Amino acid sequence: MTAPSAPSDEGFTLIEVLVAVALMGITVTAILGGMGIGLVVSSVHRSQANANTVVVSAVEKVKSSGTAYQPCATSTNAVYLAAARSAPLPSGWVANSAITIPAGGVQYWDGASFSPSHVCNDALAGFFKIQLVTVQVTSPDGKAVESLSFVKRG
């Protein structure tokens, strides 16, 4: 007959358990932090994508033949702004605050280059009736600002 064996003292020490818990805590914290950063980046990317879509749509509205060339236009030109602000917007966006033509956003061709400070040349020969118009879109949360320039001919 064999003698009964003594109870085993095998198991984990307190140090081993504490190290395992600490490693699991660090790992979970890193994973959750990465997921949080992913959510923030996703939100910013969505704002940029929406702003880009809106600015392209607004430019197409102003460029279209339905929007007449405005002689000696400025950045506050009502016709250009109304056309740009008629572009479709994502929900939660307000056209009057989102879509603008920035100061100096309408420049004139002087025969060599575009210049915002140049005097309007619309009274001169037909080839001078060229404007470089810039449309700017800002997302409601302010995370994205997109601008696009195009040439409008008279």
Image (tube, rainbow, N blue to C red):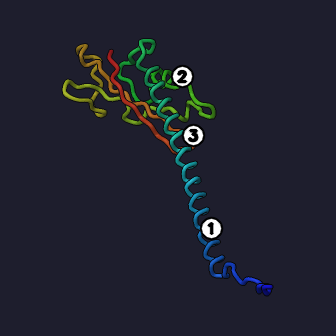
Q: Residue, x 49% and y 39% (percent of image)?
A: 48
Q: Circle 3 — which element?
A: loop
Marker disc for residue 25: 1
* Real-space Cα separation, disc 3 to disc 2, in angstroms: 17 Å
Q: Nearer the viewer, residue 31 or 57?
A: 31
Callout in the foreground (3, 1): 1
In the image, 139 versus 101, the foreground residue is: 139
- Residue drawn at 26 percent across, 25 percent down: 109
In the picture, the quarter occupied by the N terminus is bottom right
Q: In the rendered structure, are the residues bearing label 3 and label 2 in contact, judged by CB atoms less than 8 Å apart? A: no
Amino acid on which the number 2 mark rests in the picture: Ser
Q: Examine the rendered structure and indicate whether residue 41 appears above or below residue 81.
A: below
The amino acid type, in three-letter code, at marker 3 is Pro
* Secondary structure type for disc 1: helix
Residue found at x 55% / y 31%: 96
Mark 2 vs 1, N-terminal side:
1
**Secondary-structure class at tag 2:** loop
The answer to whether 111 is drawn above or below residue 15 in the figure is above
Which label was assigned to residue 140? Answer: 3
Q: Nearer the viewer, mark 2 or mark 1?
A: 1
Residue depicted at 46% across the width and 30% down the height: 55
Q: CA distance from mark 2 to mark 1?
A: 52 Å
**Where's residue 63, x and y in %?**
40, 19
Amino acid type indicated by mark 1: Gly
**Is the residue marked by circle 2 packed among few (<14), some (14-19), or many (20+) residues within 10 Å?**
some
Report which residue position mark 2 lands on. 86
**Residue contact between numbered discs 3 and 1, judged by CB atoms under 8 Å:** no
Give residue 137's position: percent from left, percent from top: 48, 35
